[in-house]
Image (cartoon, helix red, strand yellow):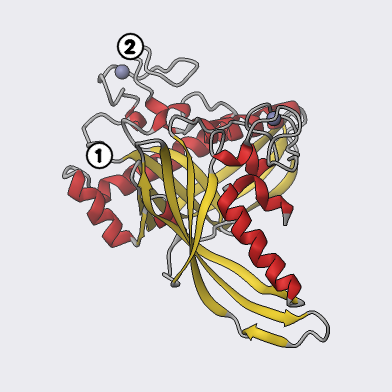
């Protein structure tokens, strides 16, 4: 239980220790069975005054029991799973910056960076920083029970997860020029462009519509193909269907996930011998989930990255090493000006 001390405020720590020692005196022990956190949301964030505070609501399912130490008899609680909720209030001193090392939750002192070890006064053993004061990192100042709200995790970040129709309508409401058919056409354009770039082992033409993270992953794989002197051939590639399956309308970004059904013969050849080393020349169908991302509030214009036009200044699109338009320095690959491809999931990996 000492593990909790670094992120519990001193009064809460005392109350909690008190509860535990009362149980020990009564020779009872608490048991939490089948704990399963089902969702969370952030009902309140407040800034100002001496402290920043965030309330986090957790939905969880568990069987909470208090057992007699000796014979294991149930004293109170239930052996059945119950839907429960709890609200934790986190506070930290105003102006505190998030610790890049991960801070207390990563068992690192948020002040000196040493492996976190607390002395009896709740201070870092090395630098004597008063960790649980909220001066260095978030601490929990209250834990209150709440009802099970059926919260979704997307909602925790101020985002609403929607089906295709309501999601498309939400985007169109803030971007009247947005057109679903035109969007599906852009998806197909991106699909063929990226599959061609992959076969050519040259991503430069596709990079402007790839998020920096996706580009990094793909360029690593392209480099591996080159190192192994392999080429991946997609022969007779055709798209059989493009279906919008999910929209997450967030406070910062809109994410649109599309199911692409396509057919191709997929094989690898050794570029030195020209021989097929993997795959098959027979066509087969496959499914991938592609997610496109754009900042909330961006308007559809006639300027599309996919047409190699800068969506900000309208110049022919050329980007520099960090993904900015060479002319106007707009961060084209960030999603702040036009849709970019941010994620590709294979059918088996797609969580829905
Ligand atoms: Zn320290
Ligand atoms: Zn530009």
Q: Residue furthest left?
A: 176
User: At x 75% / y 29%, what residue is drawn?
Assistant: 126
Ligand 2 within 8 angstroms of badge 2 C-beta: yes
Quadrant location of the N terminus?
Answer: bottom right
User: At x 30% / y 31%, what residue is drawn?
Assistant: 304
Tag 2 secondary structure:
loop
Q: Is residue 138 something that shows in the picture? A: yes
Q: Is residue 243 left or right of residue 59?
A: left
79 to 283, vertically: above or below = below
Q: Which mark is residue 327?
A: 2
Q: Is residue 154 left or right of residue 337?
A: right
User: At x 42% / y 18%, what residue is drawn?
Assistant: 319
Which mark sits nearer the N-terminus, 1 or 2? 1
Pointer 1 local density, CA inside 10 Å: few below 14, some 14–19, many at least 20? some
9 to 335, vertically: above or below = below
Q: Alpha carbon of mark 1 to alpha carbon of mark 2: how far?
A: 23 Å
From the top left corner, tell me how far across and down residue 234 is, in percent.
58, 43
Q: Is residue 242 something that shows in the picture? A: no
Which residue is more in the foreground, 126 or 274?
126
Mark nearer the viewer, 1 or 2:
1
From the top left corner, tell me how far across and down residue 128 is, in percent.
70, 30
User: At x 73% / y 40%, what residue is drawn?
Assistant: 118
Quarter assignment of residue 302:
top left
**Marks 1 and 2 in Cβ contact (< 8 Å):** no
Which residue is more in the foreground, 158 or 89?
89
Please tell me how many numbered marks the rendered image carries: 2
Picture quarter with ligand 2: top left
268 to 165, vertically: above or below = above
From the image, tell me which residue sits under label 1.
Answer: 297
Which residue is more in the foreground, 170 or 306?
170
From the top left corner, tell me how far across and down residue 188 is, in percent.
39, 45
Quarter assignment of residue 16:
bottom right
């Amino acid at each position: 239980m000492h593990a909790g001390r670094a992120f519990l405020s001193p009064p809460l720590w005392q109350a909690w220790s008190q509860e535990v020692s009362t149980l020990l005196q009564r020779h009872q022990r608490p048991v939490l069975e089948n704990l399963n956190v089902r969702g969370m949301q952030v009902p309140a964030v407040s800034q100002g005054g001496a402290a920043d505070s965030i309330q986090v609501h957790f939905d969880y399912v568990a069987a909470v029991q208090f057992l007699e130490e000796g014979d294991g008899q149930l004293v109170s609680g239930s052996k059945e799973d119950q839907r429960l909720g709890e609200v934790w209030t986190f506070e930290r001193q105003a102006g505190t910056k998030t610790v890049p090392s991960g801070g207390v939750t990563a068992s690192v002192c948020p002040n000196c960076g040493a492996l976190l070890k607390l002395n009896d006064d709740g201070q870092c053993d090395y630098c004597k920083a008063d960790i649980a004061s909220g001066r260095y990192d978030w601490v929990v100042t209250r834990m209150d029970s709440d009802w099970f709200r059926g919260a979704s995790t997307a909602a925790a970040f101020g985002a609403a997860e929607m089906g295709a129709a309501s999601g498309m309508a939400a985007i169109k409401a803030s971007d009247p020029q947005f057109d679903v058919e035109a969007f599906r056409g852009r998806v197909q354009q991106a699909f063929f462009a990226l599959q061609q770039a992959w076969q050519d082992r040259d991503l430069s033409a596709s990079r402007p519509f790839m998020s920096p993270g996706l580009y990094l992953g793909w360029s690593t794989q392209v480099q591996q193909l080159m190192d192994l002197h392999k080429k991946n051939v997609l022969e007779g590639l055709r798209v059989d269907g493009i279906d919008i399956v999910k929209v997450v309308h967030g406070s910062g970004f809109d994410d649109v996930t599309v199911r692409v059904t396509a057919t191709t013969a997929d094989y690898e050849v050794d570029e030195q011998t020209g021989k097929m080393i993997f795959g098959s020349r027979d066509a087969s169908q496959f499914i991938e989930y592609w997610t496109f991302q754009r900042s909330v509030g961006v308007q559809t214009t006639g300027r599309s990255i996919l047409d190699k036009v800068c969506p900000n200044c309208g110049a022919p699109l050329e980007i520099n090493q960090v993904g900015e338009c060479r002319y106007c320095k707009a961060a084209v690959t960030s999603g702040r000006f036009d849709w970019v491809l941010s994620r590709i999931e294979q059918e088996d990996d797609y969580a829905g």
